[in-house]
Image (cartoon, rainbow, N blue to C red):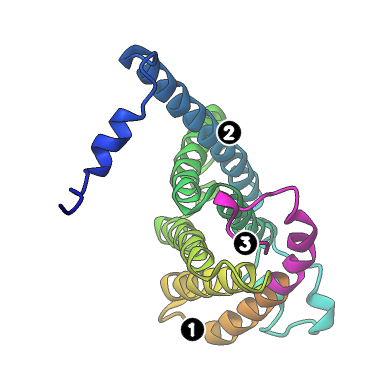
Amino acid sequence: MAETRRDPNLIHEEHRPRDVSAVVRLRKRLAMALAKFVRTAQLSVILGAFVVSCFLFLDLPMRSFDVFVGNGSNMQISNWLSQGEAWLPLSLFYVILVTRRYGAQIATQVVWVSWIVAALLLLVLFIYMAPTLSADDFPDMRFSGGLVGSWLLGQLVAIGIYDVTRGGKWWRAPLYGALFGFAAQTFTYFMVIYFEATVPWLNWLVADYCIKAVMAVLFLALYYPLRRPLRAYLGEGRY
């Protein structure tokens, strides 16, 4: 007589230790959920605090590299790039490292929570400094929405691309994740902020992305030695 196929769930129940009560299992699951929450909160606070620090320098033009273009040129980096925006690409690299270590789901949660944390911190800061601020000290809604929306989109795209390309050659996932993430961020930002503006914003878009592409390549020099201490999520390959 043919052997009857057994329900895997029933087999699982049969092999469950009898001395483990429902209360113990519930306690373990709650402990795991709490540990996951604390870890996500810690990673989010780090990213959120970094984003806030970048926002505080948004009104300072990035003039360090203007000498390479020439005075008065409309291609000077300070025409479209501030010191705060120059540091924001590091947040995308941070998100990629979080994705490697904890997976795409945790990284996505970190991105959303970090921007909420950043918004709350900036709100508290503006309320505290309100007596000393004027209307000109606040960025307009179009700029704020374009900046926040573009970086949020760029980080989420970087997570998705990294997650689907991980494995195989060690450099592929971080490089593709960074390049596609920067592409989404740069295109969205310039389309929202400068569309229909009487400035050479298409040239600025190309120049800005080229700078970030170079940063993506340089990021590999940091990613390579971090592969061992930042063990890949679920041990998926060595990359």
Quadrant for the C terminus in the image: bottom right
Give the CA distance from mark 1 to mark 3: 49 Å
- Which picture quadrant has residue 177? bottom right
In the figure, is residue 193 to the left or right of 169? left
Q: Judge the density around disc 2: few (<14), some (14-19), many (≥20) Cα neighbours within 10 Å.
A: some
Give the CA distance from mark 2 to mark 1: 43 Å
* Residue drawn at x 66%, y 76% as measured from the top left: 213
| 141 or 91: nearer the viewer | 91
Q: Which residue bears the numbered disc 2?
A: 42
Tell me the mark number nearer the camera, choosing from 3 and 2: 3
Amino acid type of the residue tagged 1 in the rendering: Thr
Q: Which residue bears the numbered disc 3?
A: 237
- N-term mark: 2 or 1: 2
Residue 228 placement (x, y as % from top left): 75, 52
| 40 or 145: nearer the viewer | 40
Determine the secondary structure under disc 3: loop
Give the CA distance from mark 3 to mark 2: 26 Å
Residue 230 placement (x, y as % from top left): 69, 49
Determine the secondary structure under disc 2: helix
* Residue drawn at x 20%, y 50% as measured from the top left: 3
- N-term mark: 3 or 2: 2
**Magenta highlight range:** 216-239
In the figure, is residue 123 to the left or right of 214? left
Answer above or below: position of 191 versus 220. Answer: below
Query: Would residue 219 be counted in the magenta stretch?
Result: yes
Residue 54 placement (x, y as % from top left): 64, 50
Answer above or below: position of 227 versus 183. Answer: above
Extreme-left residue of the structure: 1
| 168 or 12: nearer the viewer | 12
Tell me the mark number nearer the camera, choosing from 2 and 1: 2
Q: Judge the density around disc 3: few (<14), some (14-19), many (≥20) Cα neighbours within 10 Å.
A: few
